[in-house]
Amino acid sequence: MRQKQTGKGFKKPPARKTDVPSSQKKRGADMMSISDFEDTKVHEGNNYQEQIHTSKKKKKANRMTQKKKRANITASDKPIVQIRQKTSHERTLYYLEQLMLKHQITKRFPHLAFEKVAHGFDIYFHPNINLNVDEEIDQNPNATQDAATSESTNVIKFITLLSNLLPIRDLQNKSIMTGAFQKGKLGGGVQVIGASSNLESNSDADTYYIEIAPIYTGDLVCLPQRLYNSSGQIGPLVVCYKVTNSLFFIDPYTLKTLEVSSQTYFQSPFRPLLTATQLLEYTVNDVEMKRNHKGRVVSAQSGRFQLGEVSVVKTSELGISHDIQTFCHLSHLLEAGDTVYGYDLKNANFNNEDLLSYKKLVVPDVIIVRKKYDWDTQRIWTLKHFCMEPEGKDYETFLNELEEDQELRSKVLLFKHENSETIASKIKFDGEGKNPRVKLEELLEAWTI
């Protein structure tokens, strides 16, 4: 039917009424359970109502089949854990997935189902009860209550374990998620405040909102004045070099380090100035190690960091720009001709209150974060996954970080590639650490999750 043209523009014809199943009138899409969404398939054709009706019939049959295994509690009235980290990358999520595999989360908490969503995970509780619901209630009148208790216990145990792995905070009280949090100061940016947009609101169900601190290894941070003063005036420009349930920072100019616990961080939260997605390539032209009055190289963390003055130039401007002099905490790994990743602070635009609070701070032109390695062969190892997609630039960056950082990869499970021995025969392993590669003895045999 063509639209009728009027003086004010085109007027849409009245919508045709379509017969809608009574069950659908009572229950909209926002009232569907998680299992409903999981079973929905996309069909070809234009009859949307027919697609919904066909899908609902299949779902109804599926629900009848699984009735014996469900404790008369649908997914919509079960507590859901929502984990969020508002960053421009997913490296933390890849790391979290590997930590959960390392600690056998899928085996220790078999009732928890994980779903990857934007900026995090949604976790659902699915009880696995083999008895018929009616039979179980006859045997145990408190079966429903026991299921709810088991649910709450599992969720709390999971969150407790998670708090030992990453810097997080539990936002059970929704009033905490107002003000500064919604303005982005705390780095959460969780879009689902209150009940999940896909679930039926239930005031009796507990929902746990978990925020991961929006800082990861390689991020450049400006410490707030309060933290700067309490830490003995470290920085204030520091680089994050390790993440556990605390954040670890290093001043690349003095090699002084700082540990910020999860509790301390969320008392005075701050966001990174620059993240690893903003790193640029620089070419090293000269390296001079810094020595103390005894003639020893200035170092920290048992030699992991060694201070030196480095002359670099942006790789894209070789032969055009002059060399830039800066200090680096990884100077022992560098020599002329190497390529490093660094932050271009000279041309960066900052809108950071913490940085502006330091009136006399002299910002360097460049801060070097890590060395670039050219892997001439493929890896002899691989990772297992259960909810993340192993693809994309963030994933490749995460793999490179594991290859370069022995301490980081000691916290995850690395498995042998199917052709690991053949690949290993082509690799030149460097014992000095200037070209780190994972060795065969570090790897595990393949197993099924």
Image (spheres, grey):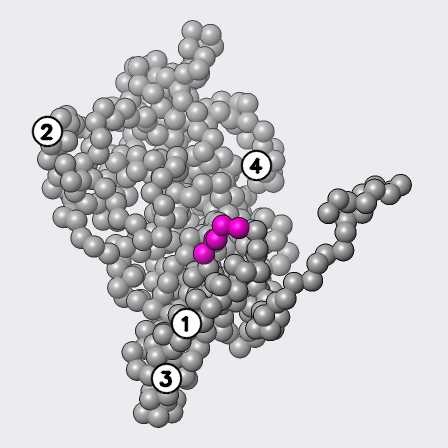
Of badges 3 and 1, nearer the viewer stands 1
Q: Position of residue 448 (x, y in %)?
A: 20, 55
Of badges 2 and 1, nearer the viewer stands 1
Which element is circle 2 on?
Answer: loop
Q: Which of 229 and 212 lies nearest the eye of the viewer?
A: 212
Considering the image in quadrants, where does the C terminus appear? bottom left
Residues at marks 4 and 2, CA–CA distance in whole angstroms: 50 Å
Of badges 4 and 2, nearer the viewer stands 2
Q: Residues within 10 Å of mark 4 (few under 14, many from 20)?
A: some
Q: Amino acid at mark 4?
A: Leu
Rendered residue at 28%/39% (across/down): 402
Query: Going from the N terminus, do you reach mark 4 or mark 1 first?
Result: 1
Which element is circle 3 on?
Answer: helix
Of badges 4 and 1, nearer the viewer stands 1
Q: Do residues under tags 3 and 2 come within 8 Å of each other at their CB atoms?
A: no
Q: Position of residue 241 (x, y in %)?
A: 36, 40
Give yes or no for residue 383 being in the magenta stretch: no
Query: Going from the N terminus, do you reach mark 3 or mark 1 first?
Result: 1
Q: In the rendered image of this protein, does residue 145 appear above or below residue 352?
A: below
Q: Which residues are magenta?
A: 41-45
Rendered residue at 44%/38% (across/down): 219
Q: Residues within 10 Å of mark 1 (few under 14, many from 20)?
A: few
Q: Do residues under tags 4 and 2 come within 8 Å of each other at their CB atoms?
A: no
Q: Amino acid at mark 1?
A: Ala
Quickly name the residue at label 2: 425
Quickly name the residue at label 4: 355
